[in-house]
Image (cartoon, helix red, strand yellow):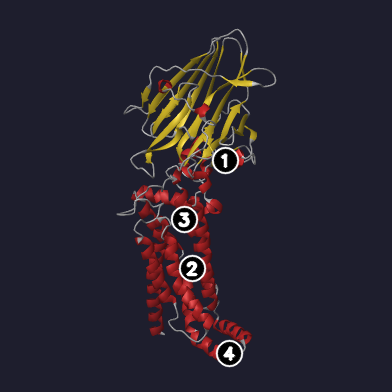
Amino acid sequence: MYFQRVFLILSFFLCSFFLWKAWNKDKNILVSHYIVKENSPTNHISKFIYNSQKNNIFIKTDVFNIVIDKNNGYIKSVKLLKYRDEEDPSKYLNLLRTESNYIFQMKTGFTEIKNFNNLHQDINGIYHTKKKFYQLLPFHNKLIVPMIFISQDGKKFIKKFIFHRGRYDVKIKYHIYNNTNKNFKVRIFGECIQTVDPFFIDNYNLSANKYRGISYSSDNDKYVRLQLDDISQNKESLYKKINIGWIAMVQKYFTAVLVPNTDVKPNTIYTKKINKDIVVAGYHNSPVYLYPHSFKEFDVKLWIGPKNQNEMAALAPNLNFTVEYGFLWFLSKPLLNCLSIFHSIFGNWGFSIIFLTLIMRLCMLPLTKAQFLSMAKLKSLKPEIDYLKNKYKNDPARISSEIILLYKRKKINPLSGLLPVIIQMPIFLSFYYTLTNSIELKYSPFIFWIQDLSSYDPFYILPILMGCSMFIGQKINSSHTFNNDISENIQEKIMFLTPFLFTIFFLWFPSGLVLYYLVSNIFNLVQQRLITINLKKKQEKD
């Protein structure tokens, strides 16, 4: 009993420590990044601001509100119509935006190679469109927005933005016409541009602010993440040739991704620092030669939106790795897959969590039963252990050796019942990462007052119920007797104190995680009661 108590105490506090660390990482936004800087200069980003509204074209689909500036054809604003701003639910979540003190843009276009030293310049100009407003109409599944630019020497450049209903991937089809009598050397590029430090508290929009960084995938690296700060401070940089891959600016739940064309290889992905406030993540392909009066066509892909893992994996290899589950990713991903299957049946993520918890507890039934039986046997030895402690009270080493001999005579392994606890700890932590990093569970309601399973219970009802269930379990498992052994009494008191500590910890944990633990505790109580009844019946028969 002594060993199990010590291990359980250590397990509870170790699990609490890891959860506190994860919670602290999620909630403590770096103040230096999100405080108001009243006197911050804005001239660093002024060149990315195009104030003329007449050059804007507006695009509306069932998932996007997009603003594209016809000056160079850059995407300057994207609102996600399926998601709301956390601070102001009346507004859509504004993922990409161009403001006087903060920018997050996507540039796509053409670069002309001027000479053999690879000196180049962007091909800039005003693109022309037939309309200022494009909308994906009902019963239409595709929207094409063509933009045309003709240079002074007659070269023709066409960018076609192609949107699909219900999808966050955007295809850009490039057409280049060299209508001149000279050879033309050109390459396609794409860039994400973002301010490193927003000069205002960004509504504490946690879904937008957390884990801002740059990620990429290449031929040899499935997934690598860089920090915006490190790039702006010249601590890290990237310039890498790839045949297959992508580069993205990522946030906790949302991302903007550039997927280069793979027909023209190799592509080069890179990062660069514009100044201390702005960094760029981009790519360009290998130079393409156009002979006089020739034509070339390229396709590239973008992703602008939530980290929907299945759709992203279909768009590009390893793109689903932008959803980060930490060191327990190998458990978190199967958990989400199981929850997704149950969600397709129940239509509610909360009931899916309950069902998955019950299945896991049923699978662990033999181990949990062994744990309860081991604890029951240890309880039965308490009188003999107390006798040994009194007999050899002046010889602690003799007490330990005699207790070990007693366990051997009774064929009891005091550590045999600890396997369920060991198994549950990584599952518990992986559940936390799944709930707090999966956009599928973000904003997902359960019942009544629980409107977001990835956020804490606003009325703290679930944590209190969880603490009560944990306390009842502790009472049932306790020996119900105290003796004069100070260390054992301290352990007993710590065990009874643990439910209260856990309740405090769980007050701000995701309600989905608390729901999992509450259901698991209730299942344990019912299971323990049934096992106790069966033991009593067996003892009466014997």
Checking the image for residue 431, the label placed there is: 3
Q: Is any atom of residue 162 visible in this view? A: yes
Can you tell which of label 4 and label 1 is closer to the viewer? 1
The amino acid type, in three-letter code, at marker 1 is Leu
Q: Which one is in front in this view, the residue at disc 2 or the one at disc 4? A: 4
Q: CA distance from mark 2 to mark 3?
A: 20 Å
Instruction: Report whether residue 300 is seen.
Output: no
Q: Are marks 2 and 1 in contact (CB under 8 Å)?
A: no
Q: Which residue is mark 1?
A: 228
Label 3: few (<14), some (14–19) or many (≥20) C-alpha neighbours in 10 Å: many
Observer-nearest of 239 and 49: 49
Q: Of helix, strand and loop, which one carries label 2?
A: helix
Residue picked out by circle 2: 367
Residue, disc 4: 393
Q: What is the three-letter code of the residue carrying label 2? A: Leu
Distance from label 1 to label 3 (Cα)? Answer: 28 Å
* Residue farthest toward the bottom in the current orientation of the protein: 391
Residue 245 lies, in percent from the top left, at 58, 35
Which-is-in-front pick, marks 2 and 3?
3
Between 345 and 48, the residue placed more toward the observer is 48
Q: Amino acid at mark 4?
A: Lys
Please give the name of the residue rendered at 38% of the width and 66% of the height, measured from the top-left corner.
Answer: 522
Secondary structure under tag 4 reads loop
Mark 3 → mark 4, Cα distance in angstroms: 46 Å
Q: CA distance from mark 2 to mark 1?
A: 47 Å
Front tag of 1 and 3: 1
Pick the front one: 98 or 65: 98
Mark sitting earlier along the chain (1/3): 1
Q: Is residue 334 left or right of residue 468?
A: right
Residue at the limit of the structure toward the top, as seen here: 181
Residue 517 drawn above or below residue 209? below
Q: Do the residues under discs 4 and 1 have CB atoms within 8 angstroms?
A: no
